[in-house]
Image (cartoon, rainbow, N blue to C red):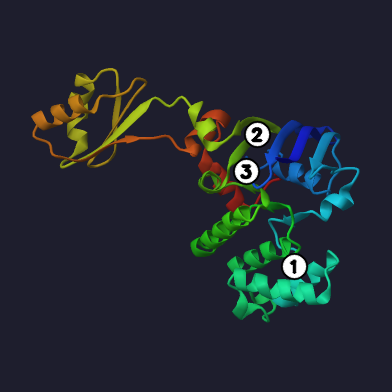
Amino acid sequence: MEIVSVSNLCKTYGKLQAVKNVSFSIQKGEIFGFLGPNGAGKTSTINMMIGLSRPSAGSIKIAGFNAVKEIKKVQALIGVVPDESNLYGEMDGFDNLCFCASLYGMRKADRETRARELLRQFNLDDTGRRPFKAYSKGMKRKLTIAAGIVHSPQVLFLDEPTTGIDVENARQIRDLLLELKKQGTTIFITTHYIEEAERLCDRIAFIVAGRIVAEGTVEELMSGFSHGHSIKLNIDGCALKYLGELREAFPDCSIHTSKENTILIKSEKRIPLSPVLQFLDGKGIPVFEARELRPTLEDVFVQITGIEAARLKKEKEQGGGKK
């Protein structure tokens, strides 16, 4: 069942058109990923969906309500986790959660029960009475997410949920998001981390220069990806010594080495492995490993957008630019 529908959404700032006729839908209980570089229009889109900014054109429906004209009804049904925490540094974790719950009209007993439940769920029991400003980055991120779901929203919006935190806390947050999905929460997530999107999301949209350039499940995006075929060989010996002979024996392939004992063979056509192994065996070269390399979502993103995935991570680490 469709719970979010965005149609021909546009946002203009003076002469700059930040979002250009963006359309997509999200099914109930789905994790939908929104990927793109700084300046692509990610935050402009999310701000219009949560009511912080009015669209220049287009429509947004969330849970059957017009998210522009009926924003108060929509805001009662959604949770928002910004990329920078909006909680109070002097207040402890418990009081921050209770305060957020009070904004949604929850009764005192209910909000205190919910706050304790979330502190346990997010492994923050021991820090519940510590001032928020004393939390680590990972703890702050987890409490910010807890605050976003304190009222059990139908749709949760997360802007860069794991940026700048350690591996263990990032893993815990991913696990929590998957658990929320199991409970029926619909999740809209923006991220610079393509591997994270591939791991979490049911469907993904790539946005570049304000336009969605591709959308679908990971499988659908991969199926339309033209990557040729590649095999990787780890051998006993110096790979560089055999490149010339291999290129002569297999002229239709691109052959190079990435490490001293690694040979990479690429071709537009499928590469039969047995002739390659027979060739190396004939030269008396033991092969420790031979495997086909499959494309990743990062490969798809780079081909569709022309933007190297490493650039996304670098941009976020530098913290510059409007998204």
Q: Quadrant of residue 121?
A: bottom right
- Cα–Cα gap, marks 2 and 1: 31 Å
The disc placed on residue 33 is 3
- Where disc 2 sits, the SS reads strand
- Cα–Cα gap, marks 1 and 3: 25 Å
The disc placed on residue 139 is none
Question: In the rendered image of this protein, does residue 41 appear above or below residue 153?
Answer: above
- Cα–Cα gap, marks 3 and 2: 14 Å
Q: Which tag is nearer the camera, tag 2 or tag 1?
A: 1
* Amino acid identity at mark 2: Val
- Where disc 1 sits, the SS reads loop
* Amino acid identity at mark 1: Leu
Q: Residue at x 35, y 35 (%)?
A: 293
Residue matched to label 2: 208
Q: Which tag is nearer the camera, tag 3 or tag 2?
A: 3
Q: Which tag is nearer the camera, tag 1 or tag 3?
A: 3
Q: Position of residue 58 (x, y in %)?
A: 83, 33
First of labels 1, 3 by sequence position: 3
Q: Are marks 1 and 3 in contact (CB under 8 Å)?
A: no
First of labels 2, 1 by sequence position: 1
Could you tell whether 300 is left or right of 151 in the image? left
User: How many C-alpha atoms fall within 10 Å of the one at disc 2: few (<14), some, or many (≥20)?
Assistant: many
Task: Decide which of 272, 264 is in the foreground and name it.
Answer: 272
- Where disc 3 sits, the SS reads strand
Residue matched to label 1: 87
Q: Position of residue 22 (x, y in %)?
A: 74, 32
First of labels 3, 2 by sequence position: 3
